[in-house]
Image (cartoon, helix red, strand yellow):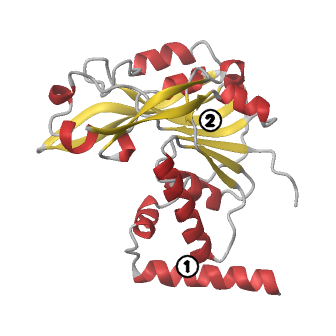
Amino acid sequence: MQKIKEYIFDVGANDGSDGIAIALKNKNFYIHAFEPNPYLVRKIKKLKKEIEKRKGTIINNYKIHCYAVSDKDKYSTFNISINHRVSSLNKLSKNLNKSWPGYEDEIFKVIKKIKVKVITLNDFMKKNKINNIRYIHIDTQGNDLNVLKGLKSKINNVSEGKMEAAINKKNAAYINNHTINDTKYFLSKTKLKIFKIKKIEHLSNGLVLKNEADIFFRHTKIKKFPYVNLNYNLRYFGRVIGSRTYFKDDFFDFFIRLKNFLIKNY
């Protein structure tokens, strides 16, 4: 088997849906995923096995690492919220009840604190002899910019990526949450350029909150990137996780499984 030399990083893997979906869609890339919550890491490994069973194939281009990622190597406190998706290294904003009405107790409330190992991607890449990141997906709840800072000089070895940022400090969900302007300033000193900013809509008590945005960036000097297929259906993975797949899911997976069986045996 030819060694894969193109890498995708999924930082803040949550339940693993994004990273595993990307791995299935991009066989020529190796996906390194990072998630500090050990409960979610177990959940990710379970999901991977279930998808492998449904598809009749081994996903050998994906690995989950139980680390938090930031701008310094250290051990730190990780705040686990009721909704695991919003857990963070950062503490919650004291203005949360005003800027995120209806979210404080039902979504953001911290129910557990654990000690986690925090690494930088610069050190991870050196240790694993990785020179380039073709695509990076970052969702670390108020810490995304620190993930980029932790790349140090290797940030200029990133081809393309996506991250989140707060619209402004006042309505940020976390203390020390970076903003769009913080991100613009930092990236202006690198070879990465923002090409799209898309506000994220959250619904609460009939209100539409626009406190965060997705930021898309790419390298300014690299003219042609190896194609990364990001066209996948996260709802399917949600149904697999919840054991509530539709007939069409099972029907489609049966034929994928049959196809993979035939490829292996004939």
Residue 103 vertical placement versus 121 (above, below): below
Figure label count: 2
Kind of residue indicated by mark 1: Asp
Q: Position of residue 106 (x, y in %)?
A: 21, 44
Image point (57%, 52%), residue name: 19
183 left or right, relative to 266? left
Q: Is residue 17 above or below residue 55?
A: above
Q: Label 2's element?
A: strand
Question: Which amino acid type is shown beneath numbered disc 2?
Answer: Glu
Label 2 vs 1, first from the N-terminus: 2
| Residue 158 spot, x, y in % from top left | 68, 31
For the question of whether residue 89 can be seen, the reply is yes
Q: Secondary structure at mark 1?
A: helix
Would you name the residue on which mark 1 appears? 253
Q: Is residue 57 above or below residue 11?
A: below
Left or right of residue 234: residue 60: right
**Which circle marks residue 208 in the picture?**
none
Q: Residues within 10 Å of mark 2 (few under 14, many from 20)?
A: many
The residue located at (76%, 44%) in the rendering is 6
Residue situated in front as seen by the camera: 84 or 164: 84
Residue under pointer 2: 160
The one of 223 and 198 positioned closer to us in this rendering: 198
Which residue sits furthest left? 205
Horizontal and vertical percent position of residue 191 = 66, 20
Q: Residue at x 58, y 21 (%)?
A: 71
Mark 2 vs mark 1: give the one in front: 1
Residue 131 at least partly seen: no
Residue 47 on image: x %, y %:
52, 64
